Image (cartoon, helix red, strand yellow):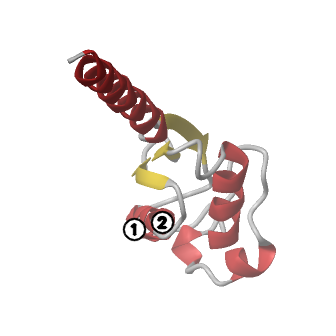
Amino acid sequence: MKNLIILIIITLFALSTTNVVAQKANKTDTISIKTSSQCGMCKARLEKAMAYEKGIVSSELNVASATLSVVYKPTKTSPEKIRLAISAVGYDADAVKANQKSYNGLPACCKKGGMDH
C-alpha cells in the first residue's frame, strides 16, 4: 500500500511538471514592426512571407499605419530574425533597411512613394 501511494505521488508530480514545460514551450510574444509597405499587395506579400518563417504563429499588416504585428514563439525566432525576414522580402523593418535586390523586384506601387492600387 505504501509503495502504491508513493507511485501515485511520483506520477502526479511527473504529470504536473510536464504540463509546466508544455506551457512554457507554447508561450508566444507579439511585436509591432514599422515597415515601408504601401498597399494591399504589400500586405499580401508580407503576410504570406511571414507564414513561411519558422516560429511565427501569425502576422497582420495594418496598411494605413504600415505596421506589421507578429505573434511568434520566442523559443523558435527573435525580433531581429523577423526584421531580417521582412527586409529579405524588400521592405524596411524599423531600423533594418530593405534588401536592395528584393526591393528592386517589388512592383512600382509597393515601393516608397508608389501609386495606390
Q: Secondary structure at mark 2?
A: helix
Q: Position of residue 107 (x, y in %)?
A: 55, 80
On the image, numbered disc 2 is attached to which residue? 42
What residue appears at the point 32 percent right and 31 percent down from the top-left corner? Answer: 15
Between 13 and 66, which is closer to the camera in this rendering? 13
Identify the residue at the far front of this view: 1
- Residue 44's disc is 1
Q: Are marks 2 and 1 in contact (CB under 8 Å)?
A: yes
For residue 11, which quarter of the picture? Answer: top left
Q: Position of residue 50 (x, y in %)?
A: 49, 62
- Amino acid type shown at disc 2: Cys
What residue appears at the point 69 percent right and 78 percent down from the top-left corner? Answer: 102
Q: Position of residue 28 (x, y in %)?
A: 46, 37
Mark 1 Cα shell of 10 Å, populated few (<14), some (14-19), many (≥20): few
Q: Position of residue 113 (x, y in %)?
A: 62, 61
Q: Secondary structure at mark 1?
A: helix
Looking at the rendered image, the quarter that the N terminus falls into is: top left
